[in-house]
Amino acid sequence: MINAAKAGYLELHLIHLMAPNNINRDDQGLPKDVTFGGVRRDRVSSQTWKRAMRVYTHEHGLLGEADQAYRSKKAGQLVYGYLRPLLTDQLTDGQIGALAAAAVGSLTGDEGEDGKLKTLFLMGRTEAAAVASTLAAYAGTPEGQAFVTGLKDVQFTDAPVSSEDTVAPVKKVKGAKAKKGAEEEAAESAWKGFGQKFRNELQRAALSAPSLEVSVYGRMVAANTDLRVDGALEVAHAVGTHRTVNQYDYFTGMDDLDLKGGAGMIEQTQFTSSVLYRYIALDIEALWQNLKALPDDERTAAILRAAQAIVTSAVKSMPSGKRRSFANNTLPGYVLGVASATHQACSLAEAFSQAITHDDLVGASVAHLEHYRAHVSAAFPREEQAFALSVTPRTLRMVGPDGAAHAPVAVDVPSIDALTESLMGALRDQLSARQAAERRAQDAGSA
């Protein structure tokens, strides 16, 4: 029986062999590491893999355009892309750009300059569209017209979002302090009203159209806590299951036009190779709450879209650091997916507190993980469904480091598609129960 008071977690435990690589470097350009269980292990930071997952999601269309968000100092450009069609007959492109930039600056408490914020801001397309709609209505009011008149033009490109987009180096996005007399006073008064009153309208618009990607990954806004979002996604630092030591690559570059031969350059770099344990948890209850502005059916559908994108991108993504030099394009050899109806996440990192020493590091890592999970599941039972995708035969996985066999810890599936389908089926049941519980609570409150 599913506990419907709170939704649970979707968890992924991955054993991932990394070919020689340097995907995540410290300030010295060396592979990141960590001391775990008393020995040095390889480490890949959570931010690095979260970024890789977001990039993979966008590049492969795992989420629709409306679900996507972009982290940038040029968030005003995203609003501009939606605002321009609404005001192109009333304002110049420069005025529209200035209005969009000022709106984002007001929302975040970060005016910035030249159309750019001082800090990065994660903004969803749905939020940008809602803000643009509110801005368009505001621009038609006397106060809005006075405000726009007092702004300095900001020239954004036409495209709403692109890595190639640039912002023209124009003047600051502020009230028209260069203007004089009555016109200056009107502009400054409009700016004050915009910053204090209309900011609330913009905020209500943004919060009424929550971004799925922002709800998953979270957002920090220092100057406006109402726009902060505690992301539902938890990603651990990937850690090696065994002891590792960095290795050196001494290499030369040849001068093709130097007929005398010899090296045109001599360099050296460090790299590493290991088996990583990766852990990812999606807090379904937190995502349910982050999307509370949506109707229940839309909320359920959005969570399932997010969960499917997380599973696929977690398995198939790879951080891009020095990939051209190492071509470390490996996939996990083992993925354990768990849909827990109990709101309690559980990493299995302790399975590797003692560094593994074995000729088959992948197989031994999988066996240690399943052996530890069998004991944890017995000691701390949860209501869950678990599915395993593995290249390691079941007979080898079921023998623990002490030589004792244990029962299967998951239902084996043959492919990533089967894994995703099985997990989504389990989540549908969980969300259906959560939705029914919320309706009962609403009915009881209105009785």
Image (spheres, rainbow, N blue to C red):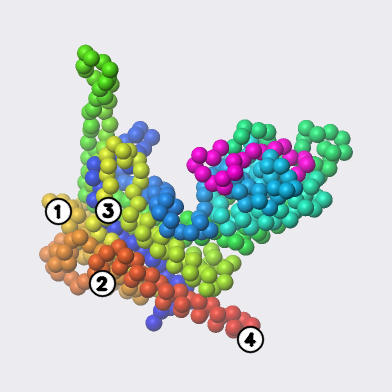
Q: Which residue is mark 3?
A: 331
Of the two numbered discs 3 and 1 in the rendering, the one whose residue sits closer to the viewer? 3
Query: Mark 4 near mark 1, Cβ–Cβ under 8 Å?
Result: no
Task: From the image, state whether disc 1 or disc 2 is nearer to you.
Answer: 2
Q: Secondary structure at mark 2?
A: strand
Q: Amino acid at mark 2?
A: Val
Density class for disc 1 (Cα within 10 Å; few <14, some 14-19, many ≥20) is: few
Whichever of labels 3 and 1 marks the residue nearer the N terminus, that label is: 3
Please, what secondary structure does the residue beneath circle 1 have? loop
Q: Amino acid at mark 3?
A: Leu
| N-terminal label among 2 and 4 | 2
The residue positioned 55% from the left and 82% from the top of the image is: 440
Question: For the residue carrying disc 3, how many other residues have a C-alpha within 10 Å: few (<14), some (14-19), or many (20+)?
Answer: some
Q: Is residue 249 magenta?
A: no
Q: Residue furthest bottom?
A: 447
Residue situated furthest right in the rendering: 182
Gap between marks 1 and 2 measured at Cα: 23 Å
Q: Residue beneath label 4, please? A: 447
Question: Which residue is denoted by mark 2 in the rendering?
Answer: 411
* x, y percent for residue 152: 72, 37
Provide the residue designation for mark 1.
360
The image shows a total of numbered marks equal to 4
